Amino acid sequence: PNIIVTIPGSGGGGSVIINSHSDVGPGPEEAFSPRYEDGVVYGRGACDAKGQVAAIILALNAIRELGIRLKGDLRAQIVIEEEAGGNGSLSLLQQGHRADAAIILEPTNLKIHPANRGAVWFKIGVKGKSAHMGKYWEGVSAINEMLGIVDILRQYEVFLREESTGNPMFPQEPSLVNVNIGQINGGDWPATVPAECFIEGGIAFLPNRRIEQIREELQAAIESKASAWVKDHYTFEFGRLHNEAFETAVDHPAV
């Protein structure tokens, strides 16, 4: 479950959500037993983001103990399922939990980040034509055809990076923009021309793009550059992770 704590304001001020998450990614079993060294906690999720959850609790306690009355409502949220897409926060939005500003606590070396890149996961499939390798000319290798799509993805990565330079919020080198192929699966027997091949991966992008624009650009690249066989025998979907990029002006009151 999500945990919500609201401190009502006295009126006349903006409302603020302060949000962090309770879930962690996987790790070895021993990582879930914390150890303490020189005042520092080491363990899975201590940095991301149990430390931030502790900071929220300490801040709420400080407001109460000091008798501070804020003008606007303060809404603290400790949410589930951040690591795999953010459904905890999304569920609260769908329930009407909104505010004038949201401060999300993540490990940032205590730096304020008013902008963040986006990420979307894709899945591309190609159907070939199965045949025994002894008569390979009667088949069409789905894996070979997929290699052409991989090359198109690499070209799109170069294009996306060139389109994303010059944003002062993202001065990092190497660029944060990339197209990653994380999984590939194809064929069912060493001596058979593979009838199917699938790749899954992710695209990291800056606020100059929306997910729908990336979908349109990538599909147009496939339609214009792929082989004639691929154009008639491929599937393309953004079926899983959908995180839009965002950028808040540095002079915004929340920043």
Image (tube, rainbow, N blue to C red):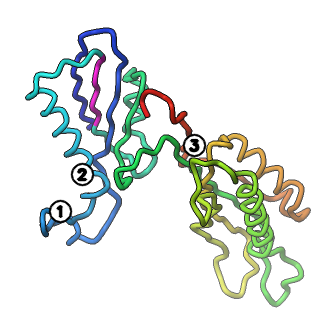
Judged left or right of residue 21, residue 207 is right
Badge 1 element: strand
Q: Can you identify the residue that label 2 sits on? A: 50
Residue drawn at x 8%, y 29% is: 65
Q: Residue 245 carries which label?
A: 3
- Please state the horizontal and vertical placement of residue 56, each as a whole percent of the image: 23, 39
Q: Which of 29 and 118 is in front in this view?
A: 118
Judged left or right of residue 172, residue 16 is left
Q: Can you identify the residue that label 1 sits on? A: 41
Badge 3 element: loop
Mark 1 is surrounded, within 10 Å at the Cα level, by few (under 14), some (14 to 19) or many (20 or more) other residues, namely some
Residues in magenta, as a range: 72-77
Residue drawn at x 74%, y 68% is: 150
Mark 2 is surrounded, within 10 Å at the Cα level, by few (under 14), some (14 to 19) or many (20 or more) other residues, namely many
| Disc 1 + disc 2, Cβ < 8 Å | yes
Specify whether residue 236 is painted magenta.
no
